[in-house]
Image (cartoon, rainbow, N blue to C red):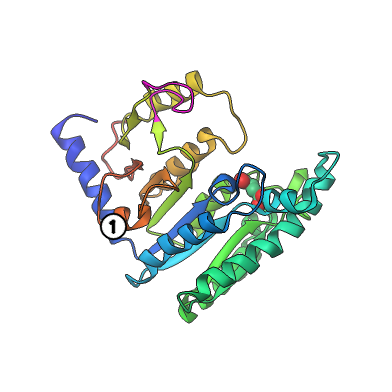
Amino acid sequence: MSSELEEAAVDEARQLAADADRVIVKAGTNSLTDDESNLDIEKLDKLVDDLEDLLSRDKEVILVSSGAVGAGTGRIEPSSGTVEESQALSTVGQSLLMHRYTESFDRYDRKVAQLLLTQHDLENPERFTNLRNTIETLLDWGVVPIINENDAVATEEIRIGDNDMLSSAAAIGVDADLLVTLTDVGGVYTGNPKEDDDAERIEAVGANYDQVQDIISETTSEGFGGIQTKVEGARDVSEHGIPAVIAKSTEPDVLEQIATAKPVGTIFVPINGVSDD
Ligand code: GLU
């Protein structure tokens, strides 16, 4: 993204992201748990502090939070690693997660709500309308909706797959103005930043999407929940005219930086005539 027009489009996208009234923030398991898979209260409080930066600006915030299976694993120490075990672990972890979110948001006198979804709920128009209405009511009340996949009942046929897809579907479905995906890398890189010191952060994705896809397929082998699904989710929302940012959850004041149009992470420029494809 080097030409003047493209730089202008990136600046414009950053401003759009900063001005967003309704924001979906997705936090991954590694943004919430430690190396032993215990729920990490410091990380969770940091996330809530960052969300408060948006809420105190009178933005509506919807959180898509992973971490249920992770938090359950730290508590139960499972033995077999079967799908059935993961499903059961999610139920242990989910209630712990919500307990901690409730406590953490209490620090700011804010209330939270839990929504557990499956693919059916996103595909069936009636269920989706009900979901939308519930979310609108919660937002009217000033309550922060916290969404996760309903892992306990999600079989192969009704699995959303991962929360990257869930958050982009939610962003499009509730007419969000911005999707932020928080993860353990600082955005999209020219290589795998965990293995390659020379990997550079790609500041913006727009017309260069195909090139970025090529880089990702060459440099990452991870499938489910890796950078690939985050990039696909961000691209999906940008194709609906919604800017998206992939950024590092440990970055200080990460959401405040986005809300003030700072160049943090990788921004996906909405496809409204700015793309060359
Ligand atoms: N629903 C899963 C959990 O809460 C996470 C899925 C994902 O990270 O994409 O553990």
Residue shown at 30% from the left, 53% from the top: 257
Instruction: Locate residue 239, reporting x and y percent.
Output: 40, 44
- Label 1 environment density (alpha carbons within 10 Å; few <14, some 14–19, many ≥20): many
Q: Splitting the image into 4 quarters, where does residue 229 fall? A: top right
User: Where 95 falls versus 83 (above or below)?
Assistant: below
Query: As rendered, which of 273 and 43 lies closer to the eye?
Result: 43
The amino acid type found where label 1 is placed reads Ala
Task: Decide if residue 185 is on the left or right side of residue 99.
Answer: left
Task: Decide if residue 6 is on the left or right side of residue 155.
Answer: left
User: Where 160 falls versus 141 (above or below)?
Assistant: above
Task: Decide if residue 132 is on the left or right side of residue 270.
Answer: right
Query: As rendered, which of 222 and 178 lies closer to the eye?
Result: 222
Figure quadrant of the N terminus: top left
Q: Splitting the image into 4 quarters, where does residue 7 fall? A: top left
Q: Is residue 117 visible?
A: yes
Instruction: Locate residue 83, reporting x and y percent.
Output: 81, 42
Residue shown at 70% from the left, 64% from the top: 95
Numbered range of the magenta stretch:
189-198
Q: Secondary structure at mark 1?
A: helix
Q: Which residue is mark 1?
A: 18
Number of numbered markers = 1
Q: Is residue 172 visible?
A: no
Asked whether mark 1 lies closer than 8 Å to ligand 1, one says no
User: Where 226 falls versus 59 (above or below)?
Assistant: above
Instruction: Locate residue 205, reporting x and y percent.
Output: 34, 35
Instruction: Report the predominant secondary structure element of the magenta stretch.
Output: loop
Tell me if residue 197 is in the magenta stretch.
yes
Figure quadrant of the C terminus: top left
Query: As rendered, which of 20 and 236 lies closer to the eye?
Result: 20
Residue shown at 79% from the left, 47% from the top: 77
Residue shown at 50% from the left, 34% from the top: 227
